[in-house]
Amino acid sequence: DSTNSPMNVGSVAQLTLTGTYSDGTTQDLSPLAPSEFLIEYYDSNNKLTYAANHSYARVSNDGVLTIFGDTDDKKITVMGIWTETVQMASVTIDIVKHVSTETVMTPYPAFIGSTDVQKTTLNKIACSSSYQQGILKTFVTLSDESVFD
């Protein structure tokens, strides 16, 4: 049923802890034990909370963030902690969702202006056993207003 919300498809991101030293060099601190990643959110009492699991997301200690549930949140904040020297950093990531999918058909072969002609039915060509041809193109719109085809 096209009126139902789209199904939830989990999204995964790999996060890393990168340290920058006073001389400007950097080092990936993620594989160096001990490090920890936590999701920052407000609980039901409106108290700022940090946890590896949340109602729609989880993050592992190796920095794999998985968004798996439905949410109206537009952003998620993850804190990385390198516990050896108690260094912390946080990053806020936009949560982008599928808004709509549209498929259109235009005549084939293409001609000047054919992208302005949308077809819904392919008809038989007069005096032949052949049918018109079309080009299908699908557009996906996301909640950040980006469009992919």
Image (tube, grey):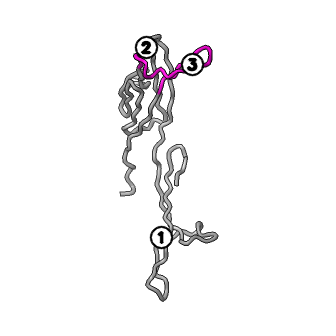
User: Which residue is more in the foreground, 41 or 113?
Assistant: 113
Q: Is residue 47 magenta?
A: no
Q: Up-down: is 87 above or below 62? A: above
Distance Cα–Cα, label 2 vs label 3: 16 Å
Report if residue 44 is visible in the image: no
Q: Earlier in the sequence, mark 1 or mark 3?
A: 3
Distance Cα–Cα, label 1 vs label 2: 60 Å
Residue found 41% across the figure and 23% down from its top: 38
Label 2 element class: loop
Residue 83 circle label: 2
Distance Cα–Cα, label 1 vs label 3: 57 Å
User: What amino acid is at disc 2?
Assistant: Thr
Residue 20 circle label: 3
Residue found 52% across the figure and 51% down from its top: 148
Q: Nearer the viewer, mark 1 or mark 2?
A: 2
Toward which corner of the image does residue 46 lie, by quadrant? top left
Label 1 element class: loop
